Image (spheres, grey):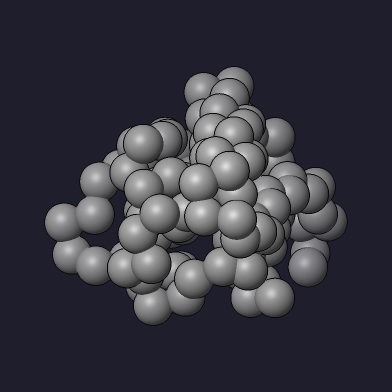
Amino acid sequence: MNTIDLIADDWKSVLDFYNDLLRAVGAPPGHGRSVDAVVDSFVWGDINRINPPLKIRIFSSNSLTKDIADEIALVSRAVEDSIEEFWRQKGEGLKITFEVNQRQSNI
């Protein structure tokens, strides 16, 4: 299992989430910053330096903004749905999970 830890303390926008996530998995230049782009590359594309199985852990000592938290939840659900479709089409399983964790500010 490849574990990706992201620190969200400085995220001010949804774009910050995508930029850190894609940088962490070694996405190619020009990778899109959207739910569909993440699903395409994580589930179907095999184009990033780090590929499934993936555990993406997001740590924040502050509360995430509603927009960012909603986008993470949307990406997580879309990836889960696409993994089910991948299983139906290919007969193979993938493991990709997203976790959001509160952390102490002095960690």
Left/right of residue 95 with respect to residue 72 in the rendered view = right
Examine the rendering and report whether any part of residue 97 can be seen: yes
Q: Residue furthest left?
A: 30
Q: Residue at x 45, y 56 (%)?
A: 42
Q: Is residue 90 above or below residue 5?
A: above
Residue 58 point in image, percent of width and height: 66, 53
Place residue 14 in its image quadrant. Answer: top left
Left/right of residue 10 with respect to residue 36 in the rendered view = right
Residue 68 point in image, percent of width and height: 53, 31
Work out which quarter of the rendered image holds the C terminus and state it. bottom right
Q: Nearer the viewer, residue 31 or 79?
A: 79
Q: Residue at x 79, y 64 (%)?
A: 106
How many discs mark residues in the rendered view? Answer: 0
Residue 72 point in image, percent of width and height: 57, 36
Work out which quarter of the rendered image holds the N terminus and state it. bottom right
Examine the rendering and report whether any part of residue 7 can be seen: no
Q: Residue at x 41, y 35 (%)?
A: 35
Q: Residue at x 32, y 68 (%)?
A: 47
Q: Nearer the viewer, residue 16 or 98?
A: 98
Q: Is residue 69 above or below residue 93?
A: above
Residue 41 point in image, percent of width and height: 37, 55
